[in-house]
Image (cartoon, rainbow, N blue to C red):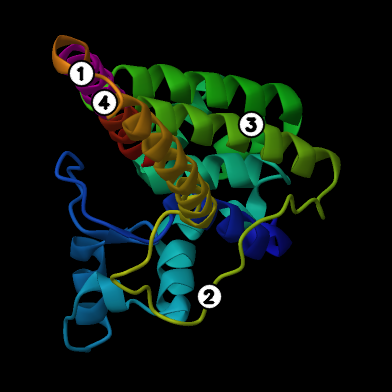
Amino acid sequence: MKENLETALKHVLVHEGGYVNHPKDPGGATNRGVTQRVYDAYRDRHKKARRSVRAIEASEVADIYKRQYWDAVRGDDLPSGLDYAVFDYAVNSGPKRAAQDLQRELGVNVDGVIGNVTLAAVAKADVYDLIDRLCARRMRFLKGLRHWPTFGKGWTRRVTDVLEISTAMATDPNADTAAVQLVETPAKAEETPRESVTQSQTMQASAVQLGSGAAGIWGAITQLDGTDRTLALVFIGVIVLTSLWIARERVKAWAEGWR
């Protein structure tokens, strides 16, 4: 539905996030889901000087998503809910892939172009069932990608959210489940993930508690003599190293699942 573009874009941008340049992401430097390559082509087409995708403007983001993804999958002509499900799939994996998998679920000719035949089949289908089957097919496709071990957790979370939101939109076209607003200022280099504020506060509180506990433990150790003190220090060293390793693995898992 034409009226759903703004809402659909807000939901897409929740998952795309800000500037990232993950070494294992084949897309390279990306901001709000727009790769540097796509942004370069967009600036070239509008006869503007190339610049870092970090500086992409909200209006450019909206224009790119509409022309290259929403229009490519005929978002205006798809029923509410399915429009968002296909749109998000197109953004994440390309319009052709999204269109082909929609056509496979509809049982029509798979050419990657959503035309009158595909739209006629959509009109006859149960939109809830179609959304569910499309998202399930999307997950099967993602699990077969070589980057699944790195990004699988984030992809799963994304498709799960898409299924929930698109189903809600199919029931109520005005459904807008806490989507993030499109900010009019360019992304900054110092931007951090959405959870960063909460995590920062939690880490600060934990640091205070750790400091207090450490002081108490050290006071007890200083009361020991000789071998007992050595054994206590070795034991504490093992605990500290183990804790650091666990923390490192958790941060690594969180970072890999972010995308």
**What's the distance in space between the residues labelled 4 and 2, CA to CA?**
42 Å
Contact, CB < 8 Å: mark 3 with mark 4?
A: no
Nearer the camera: disc 3 or disc 2: 2
The stretch of residues the image draws in magenta is 230-246
Q: Is residue 215 above or below residue 235?
A: below
Q: Earlier in the sequence, mark 4 or mark 2?
A: 2
Q: Earlier in the sequence, mark 1 or mark 3?
A: 3
Residue flagged by tag 3: what amino acid is it? Leu
Provide the secondary structure element on which disc 4 rests: helix
How far from the left and from the top, in percent, is residue 89? 47, 40
Nearer the camera: disc 2 or disc 1: 1
Q: Check disc 4 and report the residue beneath it.
A: 240
How far from the left and from the top, in percent, is residue 101? 45, 27
Q: Earlier in the sequence, mark 2 or mark 1?
A: 2
Residue at horizontal 74 percent and vertical 34 percent from the top = 167
Q: Earlier in the sequence, mark 4 or mark 1?
A: 1
**What's the distance in space between the residues labelled 2 and 1, CA to CA?**
61 Å
Compared across the picture, whether 229 is left or right of 93 comes to: left
Q: Check disc 1 and report the residue beneath it.
A: 225
In depth, the one of 34 and 224 nearer the eye is 224
Q: Check disc 2 and report the residue beneath it.
A: 183
Provide the secondary structure element on which disc 1 rests: loop
In depth, the one of 163 and 24 nearer the eye is 24
Provide the secondary structure element on which disc 2 rests: loop
What is the number of the mark on residue 163?
Answer: 3
